[in-house]
Amino acid sequence: MSNYKIKNAFWSILMLTCFATACTKDDASSSKITLFSFGPSGIQHGDKVKFIGQNLDKVTSVILPTDVEIPASQFATKTSTLLEIVVPEEAQAGTVTLKTTQGDIVTKTTLNFLVPVNITSITPAVVKPGNTISIKGTFVDWITSVTFNAGVEVTDFVSKSHGEVVVTVPAEAKTGFITFETGGTKPLKITTTDPLTVTLPTVSAISPASVKHAENLTITGTDLDLVTSITFPDKTKVTSFVSQTETQLVVTVPVTTKSGALTLTVASGVTIVPTQQLVITLPIATSFSPSDPNAQIDGATLVITGTDLDLVKSIKFPGVATEVTTFTQSSTQISIVIPNGTMGGTMIFTTIHDFKVPVTVPFGNQLTLLSVIYDEQPEGTFGAGGGWGTTSSDVASTDFVRVGTKSIKATFGSDYGGAAQFGTWGKSPLSVNGATYFAFSIYGGAGTDGKKINVNVSGSQVLVVIAAGKWTDVQIPLSSVGSPTTISEVWFQDQGWSGTVYIDQIGLK
């Protein structure tokens, strides 16, 4: 570009600035101190900034952001129409103030810089959330934001200077790389080459080794004050603690939980799973009297010996719908009258906190299966189908249970032939080798007494009569269903009636 073009470009800028500041000929001929233009913007620290105007020799000082004052004695050039200053390193972007005897002149536009931010160190390399890190280098005071791993951004700083910025590590920060964004005419985005390690809690011990529901559990370790929640094995999340310090956390055990692994979570969402697991103290039966499988048990007194039996609130016997709540007990023994209709299988202890504990009884008709299709859940290669028509099937019902804690709840609609079904569906079928019977237990809901259910075993069908309000143990000779060598599908199908039945302990005997 020729000198002529440069001069014309300069005066175009000057004229635009005069227009913006309402500069007039009268102003130009008076003693009034007037600023026409200044710049350039985008220079680096250590360069000169020019101020063009009228009577500028009367300016006493120039204040650059933020509060960096340069007295007239330090001006590089000082004439009536031109001032020049060297920009010090501590100057920031913003408007400039000229101090004069006629009052302050504040620029209408901002002065900005091209800033070569350089980060030389970040310490410490391992930091706990809530503590600070120091970012050192040159022009680091031009850092406008610090973004930790997972997008956690900080824009408020503990302190800023030309050579150091101090920032608090937020609770949500995770171990990883940090990104810095800077100001200036050409903002920078700088990412660290080494990750910052954010401290996590550690667990050294959980006590007591076995704890009861609703009692306090003490967790010891380091940095436990960072824990925001504890998830127990039953998925109950606890966010309120009895007490919490760096080295100890005390929490009340939920009454719904079971034994298993704890999960500690911090504000960032990172989880810690201690190697020591939670052990819940539950009533345990170690012996029974009578224990003869062939004994006449209805009305007899059963003596149960074990540990923590004082936690038992009620007992449900297999085959009996009503729980028994009247018995004598201590921590090591329960004496209880066996109700009429008790069958072999699983009794249920309900604790004082309504937690259910299955206990296998040693008396009565035992349901010992050679191969299992359903016991608490579909077993082996079998899966549960949803049935068809208006039939619904819940394979984890706790309403009525023959053995264990779960059974199949099959609810039949008004359409004929709806079914609850199980099958291997492309997987290996179940071999009947060594078995004589296809077996299951069925409990009839209200209105089903005397109804018939069609049991389909791999294509062959047998009708079974339902008894309402009690369990019936069914054994179907395999010879009655075509003597199959394998079983790949089982249906339980209504015969044109609606109602609910419960099915448990499906398999081969």
Image: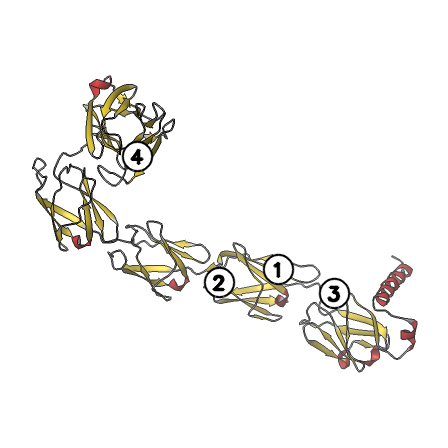
The answer for how far apart the CA atoms under marks 2 and 3 are is 34 Å
Q: Nearer the viewer, mark 4 or mark 3?
A: 4
Q: Secondary structure at mark 1?
A: strand
Q: Which residue is mark 3?
A: 43
Q: Quadrant of the N terminus?
A: bottom right
Q: Nearer the viewer, residue 377 or 162?
A: 377
Sequence-first disc among 2 and 1: 2
Please indicate, yes or no, whether residue 509 appears anywhere in the rendered image. Answer: no
1 or 3: mark nearer the eye: 1
Residue 330 figure quarter: bottom left
Q: Is residue 135 visible?
A: yes
Where's residue 320, x and y in %? 18, 39
Quote the CA–CA distance across marks 2 and 1: 20 Å
**Whole-Å distance between the Cαs marked 1 and 4?**
61 Å
**Mark 4 vs mark 2, CA separation in Å:** 58 Å
Callout 2 crowding tier (Cα within 10 Å): few <14, some 14–19, many ≥20: few
Depth order, front residue of 153/73: 153
Check disc 1: other Cα within 10 Å, few if <14, some if 14-19, many if 20+: some
Under circle 3, the secondary element is loop
Q: Which residue is denoted by mark 1 in the rendering?
A: 181
Residue 79: image quadrant is: bottom right
